Amino acid sequence: MSDASLNSDLVRQSAATLATAIARGEVSSEQVTQAHLDRIAEVDGQVNAFLFVDPEASLARAREVDAQISSGIIASPLAGVPIALKDLLATRGVPTTCGSKILEGWIPPYNATIVERLESAGVVSLGKTNMDEFAMGSSTENSGYGPTHNPWDLERIPGGSGGGSAAAIASFEAPLAIGTDTGGSIRQPAAVTGTVGVKPTYGGVSRYGIVALASSLDQAGPCARSVMDTALLHSIIAGHDPRDSTSINAPVPDVIAAAKSGDVRGMRIGVIKQLQGEGFQSGVISQFNAALEILAGLGAEIVEVSCEHFQYALGAYYLILPSEASSNLARFDGMRFGIRVGDDGQHSVEQVMSATREAGFGAEVKRRIMLGTYALSSGYYDAYYGQAQKIRTLITRDFEAAFAQVDVLVSPTAPTTAFKLGAKVNDPLAMYLNDIATIPVNLAGNCAMSLPAGLAPEDGLPVGFQIIAPAMADDRLYKVGSALEAALVDKWGGLLIDEVPSL
Amino acid sequence: MHLGRLARLELTESEVDHYTEQLGQILGAIEAISDVAADDIPPTSHPIPVVNVYREDVALPGLDREDFAVGAPAWEDDRFLVPRILDEPA
């Protein structure tokens, strides 16, 4: 086998296969890492998934892991496998921009807990991935460093905010990635790129060292090309962290066993009535319904469930998120990190702050900061933020009532397939609708997965199938997900991502 | 304009016009949430309720000053260097 074909073979393998081969000494982590770095060098000019790569550092780390393995220490089931990290994870000594110009050049002094866990697990970082600025967006077009392109069609969006992480996986630049999901930023990119992504239960994965967007909604999670790879990554990053006071101090559900079982016989699956029909593309609905039939054929019972308050979720979310974001982003004041503008010895700290934020933040970030500032201002607080918090309670109650009847809920992940770059960039409301099916889960704090259901007949683009489970029942996502995935692999002769056009 | 000041954003005039229109549209779309009768519904501020989370009272090492210097926009004598803090003519 020539070096070139060996490389192209390595980058198409699952993380589980790579880890096994590395553990057995059939291939080194250095070789696997090099193959992915080569792939990044080859295609990232077109995809723009990465904001930062440091090949020497990645290879050095891979060699350390190789040395560990040859001395008999296999740190985890993913030891030696490379990963891409969304650029809002603080990485010590490695630039972290959150897709924003305001943080250009910032070098964090510490690692996020997730980064620490991955390091101890012997997972090798390839670099940092592109995103909508501070995770505000559904298309990665709000990045201060240019949009990421969808590997299925480079003219189209890869979803957002984690479009860089999803596109890196879908273009075989990395077998694994970390995303964060505040309103759908892991699941919607997974849906439109034909990959798998999980938003764990709120508090299931530490938020320490993740630059905060909306603290009561943010949750980091795993991204991969298969359900099993996603489960392996989930089990490494999840678990209690004393440095995050919202972290859940309880055992992590056994997501790996669930992914292995893939048995849905006797499970009750609820289809959310409010998340279909108007606004949903016909091919999205047809692929969703086909997946439902498969699950029914595997022995699950499919019922329809009504969640009446979901129609208000988007409104509540666009008050709660901006309110929390306007407070969280107050820390970007040009004093301690990132850029500073207008500090000429004449202007005061207030003036420098305002000039720095004006220059450093993009349009969507400014919109949401102002919206949040308005919603929290005296006289409006009760009508906006207060009312949104009550809607949040009603949505949580809808979930509770639904989960009294069914084991999991399902819906299409996003109402449409990937749209053209630029199509919605000047229409915030149209952009916000992309997250209509994913937002309720963030409001209630439970967990959800998106996995590929197929290609929409009208445009040949991937459709995402969303599975939703109660808080701390993340294992159910993997049970249902792996059952559906296995049936689809049988039908297609491989994963959906195998159909992605070569770049 | 007032909102821009509250949010510490030095907006240009054309930005003020643009955002005034857009924020009006967004608020218009959000308004429907006020139709829900929710007077007796308790608010949720946090999805998974946890209270009084403490850690062990053990001193842990902090970060080194040099680490902050690397990412700071201005740094002098082991400290962040900032503009004057009083809003009067210099």
Image (cartoon, rainbow, N blue to C red):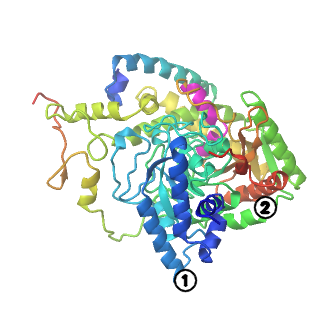
Secondary structure mainly formed by the magenta segment: helix
Circle 2 residues within 10 Å: few <14, some 14–19, many ≥20: many
Query: Where's residue A325, x and y in %?
Result: 44, 39
Q: Horizontal placement of A109 versus A11: left or right?
A: left
Q: Type of residue at label 1?
A: Gly
Q: Quadrant of residue B20?
A: top left
Nearest to the observer: residue B14 or residue A250: B14
Q: Is residue A194 left or right of residue A128?
A: right
The answer to whether residue B8 is seen in the rendering is no
Viewer-proximal residue among A311 and A433:
A433
SS for callout 1? loop
The residue indicated by pointer 1 is A72
Residues under labels 2 and 1: Cα distance?
A: 32 Å
Above or below, A322 relative to A8: above
- Which is nearer the N-term, disc 2 or disc 1? 1
Image coordinates of residue A320 in percent, x first then y, are 51, 37
Q: Which quarter of the rendering shows the N terminus of chain A?
A: bottom right
Chain for mark 2?
A
